Image (cartoon, rainbow, N blue to C red):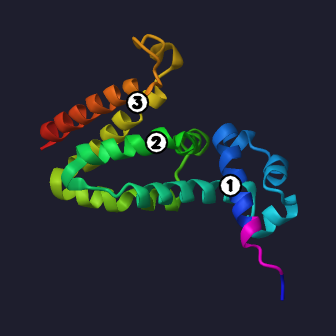
Amino acid sequence: MPPDATDTKRRILAAARAEFAQYGLAGARVDRIAETGQANKRSIYVHFGSKNDLFDRVVTSALTDMAESVPFTAEDLPAYAGALFDYLIARPEVLRLTTWAGLERAEASPNEVYAYEPKVTVLTEFFGEMAVDVLALLLGQVTAWQSASAALRAHAPDDPWSASRIQQHRALLITSVEALVGAAK
């Protein structure tokens, strides 16, 4: 009976997630993933295929984990925005992964496209042809603080990453999404 590769795969995926979040697809190195994951490069290719395939798997996994942890509530988009904001503040690597995917890929993977399909379908019931716009604006607002330049955040009256500052931003986010929902109806 061959040895169980479950732990090896878990270590590789954890190492790949950190590597891709830090360096993106182009900058990531399989040898660093192997070293950090305590595996050899061959086992990475055997279990996950090419570096591109591994990147897609990591991004898809991050999106799946996020969707499971933050259930989409079309009936209460402000609460969804707040919960998603909290999730991304606690797991900044997820936003970095999806940003890298957008920067380094001309087109989204089928799994990434599929991840949005149920949300767009439900939002279409509420907003008609504006569903995609509403979701894009909501996601832009959710990620605005993390995506703002360090130069802009430097103008915050206190530490831009302090708990009180994050809560102030979150409250403003929720108010902003309430306005978005009202304007889109």
Find residue 14 and report its horizontal and vertical position in percent.
68, 55
Q: Is residue 64 left or right of residue 12?
A: left
Element under disc 3: helix
Judging by the rendered image, the residue that carries numbered circle 3 is 144
Q: Nearer the viewer, mark 3 or mark 1?
A: 1
> Decide: marks 2, 3 in contact (CB < 8 A)?
no
Q: CA distance from mark 3 to mark 1?
A: 26 Å
Q: Which residue is mark 2?
A: 88
Left or right: 17, with 92 as reference point: right
Look at 79% across and 45% down and name the residue there: 29
Tell me if residue 55 can be seen.
yes
Residue located farthest toward the bottom when viewing the structure as drawn:
1
Q: Quadrant of residue 123?
A: bottom left
- Under mark 3, the amino acid is Ala
When the figure is inspected, residue 148 is found, relative to residue 128, above or below; the finding is: above
The span picked out in magenta is 3-8
Mark 1 highlights which residue? 14
**In the image, which is nearer the foreground, mark 2 or mark 3?**
2
Mark 2: few, some, or many residues within 10 Å (few <14, many ≥20)? Answer: some
Q: Quadrant of residue 116?
A: bottom left
Left or right: residue 124 versus residue 61 is left
Q: Position of residue 143 (x, y in %)?
A: 42, 35
Which class describes the residues within 10 Å of circle 3: few (<14), some (14-19), or many (20+)?
Answer: some
Above or below, comparing residue 176 to residue 72 in the picture: above
- Horizontally, is 105 left or right of 89 in the view? right
- The residue drawn where x is 22% and y is 46% is 130
Identify the element where label 1 is drawn.
Answer: helix
Say which residue appears at 36% left-offset and 41% top-offset: 139
Whole-percent x, y for residue 115 in the image: 43, 59
Mark 3 and mark 1 in contact? Answer it, CB < 8 Å: no
Q: How far from the left and from the top, in percent, is residue 176?
A: 23, 32
